[in-house]
Amino acid sequence: ARSDPGLFFQPEMTLRILFAALVLAAGPAMAQPMPAIPKTAIKPDPTHATFILPKDLKWKKESLGQLQAPLYGDPDKPGPYGILIKWPKGQMSHPHFHTTDRFAYVVQGTWWISTGDHWDPKTTWPLPQGSFATDLANKVHWDGSKDEDLILLVTGMGPMKTVTVPEK
């Protein structure tokens, strides 16, 4: 049986492929120091390949308490996006949901998550470094870090809005 050739052009499949490529390419680099640049090295032509070095990430504080650094696209605009999210040690969001699916990979640290609208850090579940999760659209959850700094790689399709919900 042949599969539908249009399958790979569906937005969710395209997003998953982009996510996998980004994780494979960027994930290990996050933990590595910048190597010495050989004198013979030539910086790549930005019309052929673009890149962001760790020192050039532009971290910005967001409303849920975390820092975000854009990698590509914009969650507020139509199309795919990728961002790094940094949760400082001991920082957690409160119950919220996103209007589209978001795909998350734990680059560094342990990500503590909970579903539902009752905020109690003792009820969070740990996802260690290397874990993958999907925040399903319009499903309430909350998350963050406990004992260490945390970095997540998050991708999705915009436009996406984050909606805070009242705690019970």
Image (cartoon, rainbow, N blue to C red):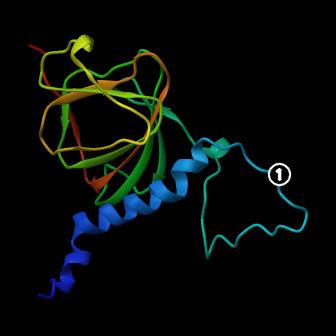
Tell which residue pokes out farthest to the front in this image.
1
Q: Nearer the viewer, residue 34 or 167?
A: 34
Q: From the top left corner, tell me how far across and down residue 35 is, in percent.
A: 77, 50
Number of on-image labels: 1
The residue singled out by tag 1 in the image is 36
Tell which residue pokes out farthest to the bottom in this image.
2
Q: Is residue 111 above or below residue 22?
A: above
Determine the secondary structure under disc 1.
Answer: loop
Q: Tell me the amino acid under the disc marked 1.
A: Ala
Q: From the top left corner, tell me how far across and down residue 21 is, in percent.
A: 44, 63
Tell which residue pokes out farthest to the left in this image.
168
Q: Is residue 42 above or below residue 92?
A: below
Image quadrant occupied by the N terminus: bottom left
Q: Nearer the viewer, residue 50 or 126?
A: 126
Q: From the top left corner, tell me how far across and down residue 41 is, in percent.
A: 83, 67
Image quadrant occupied by the C terminus: top left
Tell which residue pokes out farthest to the right in this image.
39
Q: Does residue 141 appear left or right of residue 103 in this picture?
A: left
Q: Is residue 118 above or below residue 53?
A: above
Q: Is residue 27 above or below residue 98?
A: below
**Residue that appears at 19% across and 24% down:** 95
Quarter location, residue 117:
top left
Q: Does residue 126 appear left or right of residue 67 in this picture?
A: left
**Residue that appears at 12% across and 37% down:** 139
Q: Nearer the viewer, residue 130 or 62?
A: 130
Q: Does residue 40 appear left or right of residue 52 in this picture?
A: right
How crowded is the residue under tag 1: few (<14 C-alpha within 10 Å), some, or many (20+)? Answer: few
Q: Nearer the viewer, residue 31 or 88?
A: 31
Q: Does residue 135 appear left or right of residue 53 in this picture?
A: left
Q: From the top left corner, tell me how far across and down residue 121 is, in percent.
A: 27, 13
**Residue that appears at 25% across and 53% down:** 159
